[in-house]
C-alpha cells in the first residue's frame, strides 16, 4: 500500500490548484469553474449521455418484462425447465442492469444529488440484500399482502432478492438460532416442495415490482414524459443543474462506481485487500453468491463506464468524455485511461476459474492484478481526468488514499 502514497500525494498537489471543492466554488486560476473546450458542443455531449442512459434503460425494461413472464411461468408450473428459463432471463436482465449501475446520475441517483429520485435501489439494491429478512418473509408470506412492495425494506426485494429466490435451493436459513422462525419451528416445518414453491411465488411479486420500477425510470428520462434528457442537455438553464459543469460532475461522480463499488466492494473486500474482510478470502462478500455471476457483473460495469468514456455507439462511436478531452488538448489522458481499461480487461480475462469464489481461493495473485489495474484507473480519474476537465471529486472519494 505504501508504494501508492507518493503517487497520491503528487496527485493531490496537482489537483490542488485546478480541482474545485464540492462547495461549487471555482478553483484558483478559473473564473468560471468550467474548462475552455473551444467550439466543442458540450450540450450535445450531455444529450449523448442521456440518450445512452435511456437506450439501456429501455433495454432493461424489456428484459425485466421477459424475466417477470418467465418467473410467473415458473411459479405456475414449478417445472425444472421453467425455473431454468427464469434463471436465464434473470441473467439477461442483470447484464443490462450492471451496465446501468454506472449511470447513477439523474433520477437513479440519491435524492440529495442533482435531479436524484432514489430510483436505483428498488431495481437493484445490492449490497443491501438481507438473506435472513428474505427467509423471514418466505415464512410469513408477507409478499402476498397487497401493496407489500411499496413499503417493504428494499433489502427484501429488487433484482438482488430475485437472485436468491431463483437460484438458492438449500434447506437451511441464515437467521440466528434465536430468530423466531427457528425457535418456533416455522422454518423447519416447510418441506422442500413448499419452500421451493414459496420462493417462486415471492420471486414473482419481486419481478412484477421491478417491472414497474424500471418503467418508471424509463419514463423519468423519456422525452415524451419526464424528459430528464432535456434537463441534462440544457444544464445551466434547467432546474436540476445550475451549470454545464455541474452536469458533467454528476456524470463523472457516477463513473466513480468503478472505483468505489467495483474495485473496493466487489473485488477488494472479498479478496481481503481492504480492512472490511477480517480473514481472507471473504467469500460471503462476493456480489453474486447464488447465481455465481460476479465476474460477469464486473464486465458489464466496465461496459457502462466505457460507454460514457468512449461513446455509446458500436465500437465506442458517438460522443463521450474522450471527445471532450480531445477538445481541451488532453489526448494523453485519453490514452492513459484507454491503456488502463486494456489492463483491467486483461486481468479479468486471466481469471479463468469457473467462479469468482474459486479465483479468490486458487488465484489470489490474479485477483490482486485486477485490483491493482482498477486502482490505476481510479488514480487517473482522481488526478489527471478531473484536473484537465476542471471537475470535482465526489466527497466519498476525496479522502480515499487507496
Image (tube, grey):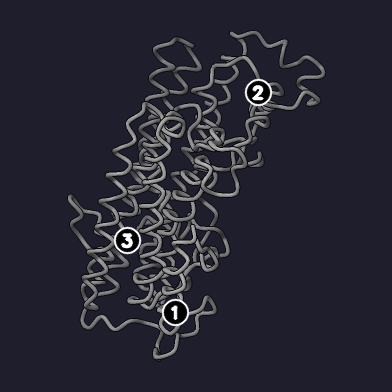
Residue in view at x 35 percent, y 59 percent:
223
> Comparing marks 1 and 2, which lies closer to the viewer?
1
**Residue at left 46%, top 31%?**
361
Image location (x, y in percent) of residue 43:
30, 72
Determine the secondary structure under disc 3.
helix
Q: Quadrant of residue 306?
A: bottom left
Quarter location, residue 235: bottom left
| Numbered tag placed on residue 359 in the rendering | none
Identified at 38% across, 37% down, the residue is: 295
Q: CA distance from mark 3 to mark 1?
A: 31 Å
Q: Which mark is in front, 3 or 1?
A: 1
Distance in Å between CA atoms under marks 1 and 2: 54 Å
The disc, 1 or 2, on the residue closer to the chain's N-terminal end is 1
Q: Residue 327: x percent and y percent?
A: 21, 76
Q: What secondary structure is marked by label 2?
A: helix
Name the foreground residue: 171 vs 353: 353
Label 1 sits on residue: 13
Chain-order first, disc 3 or disc 2: 3
Dot 2 corresponds to which residue?
A: 138
The residue sitting at the front extreme is: 3
Circle 2 residues within 10 Å: few <14, some 14–19, many ≥20: many
Residue 49: mark in rendering: 3
* Residue 89: image location, x then y, percent: 38, 28
In the image, residue 216 lies at what x, y percent? 47, 48
Amino acid at each position: 500500500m505504501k508504494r501508492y502514497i507518493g503517487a497520491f500525494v503528487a496527485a493531490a498537489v496537482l489537483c490542488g490548484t485546478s480541482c474545485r471543492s464540492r462547495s461549487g466554488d471555482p478553483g484558483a486560476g478559473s473564473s468560471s469553474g468550467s474548462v475552455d473546450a473551444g467550439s466543442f458542443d458540450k450540450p450535445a455531449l450531455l444529450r449523448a449521455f442521456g440518450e445512452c442512459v435511456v437506450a439501456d434503460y429501455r433495454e432493461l425494461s424489456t428484459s425485466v418484462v421477459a424475466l417477470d413472464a418467465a418467473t410467473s411461468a415458473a411459479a405456475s408450473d414449478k417445472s425444472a425447465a421453467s425455473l431454468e428459463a427464469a434463471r436465464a432471463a434473470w441473467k439477461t436482465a442483470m447484464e443490462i442492469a450492471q451496465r446501468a449501475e454506472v449511470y447513477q446520475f439523474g433520477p437513479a441517483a440519491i435524492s440529495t444529488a442533482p435531479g436524484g429520485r432514489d430510483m436505483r435501489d428498488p431495481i437493484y439494491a445490492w449490497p443491501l440484500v438481507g438473506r435472513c429478512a428474505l427467509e423471514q418473509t418466505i415464512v410469513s408470506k408477507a409478499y402476498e399482502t397487497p401493496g407489500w412492495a411499496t413499503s417493504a425494506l428494499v433489502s427484501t426485494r429488487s433484482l438482488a432478492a430475485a437472485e436468491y429466490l431463483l437460484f438458492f435451493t438449500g434447506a437451511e436459513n441464515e437467521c440466528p438460532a434465536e430468530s423466531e422462525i427457528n425457535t418456533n419451528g416455522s422454518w423447519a416445518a416447510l418441506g422442500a416442495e413448499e419452500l421451493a414453491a414459496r420462493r417462486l411465488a415471492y420471486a414473482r411479486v419481486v419481478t412484477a415490482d421491478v417491472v414497474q420500477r424500471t418503467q418508471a425510470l424509463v419514463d423519468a428520462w423519456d422525452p415524451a414524459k419526464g424528459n430528464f434528457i432535456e434537463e441534462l442537455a440544457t444544464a445551466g438553464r434547467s432546474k436540476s443543474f445550475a451549470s454545464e459543469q455541474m452536469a458533467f460532475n454528476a456524470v463523472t461522480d457516477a463513473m466513480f462506481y468503478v472505483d468505489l463499488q467495483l474495485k473496493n466492494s466487489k473485488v477488494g473486500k472479498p479478496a481481503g485487500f481492504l480492512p472490511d474482510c477480517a480473514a481472507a478470502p471473504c467469500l460471503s462478500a462476493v456480489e453474486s453468491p447464488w447465481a455465481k455471476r460476479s465476474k460477469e457483473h464486473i464486465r458489464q460495469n466496465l461496459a457502462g463506464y466505457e460507454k460514457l468514456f468512449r461513446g455509446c455507439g458500436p465500437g465506442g462511436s458517438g460522443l463521450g468524455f474522450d471527445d471532450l478531452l480531445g477538445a481541451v488538448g488532453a489526448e494523453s489522458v485519453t490514452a492513459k485511461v484507454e491503456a488502463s481499461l486494456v489492463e483491467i480487461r486483461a486481468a479479468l480475462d486471466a481469471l479463468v476459474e469457473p467462479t469468482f469464489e474459486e479465483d479468490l481461493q486458487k488465484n489470489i495473485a490474479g485477483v490482486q492484478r485486477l485490483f491493482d489495474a482498477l486502482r490505476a484507473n481510479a488514480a487517473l480519474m482522481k488526478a489527471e481526468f478531473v484536473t484537465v476537465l476542471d471537475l470535482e471529486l465526489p466527497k466519498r472519494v476525496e479522502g480515499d488514499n487507496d
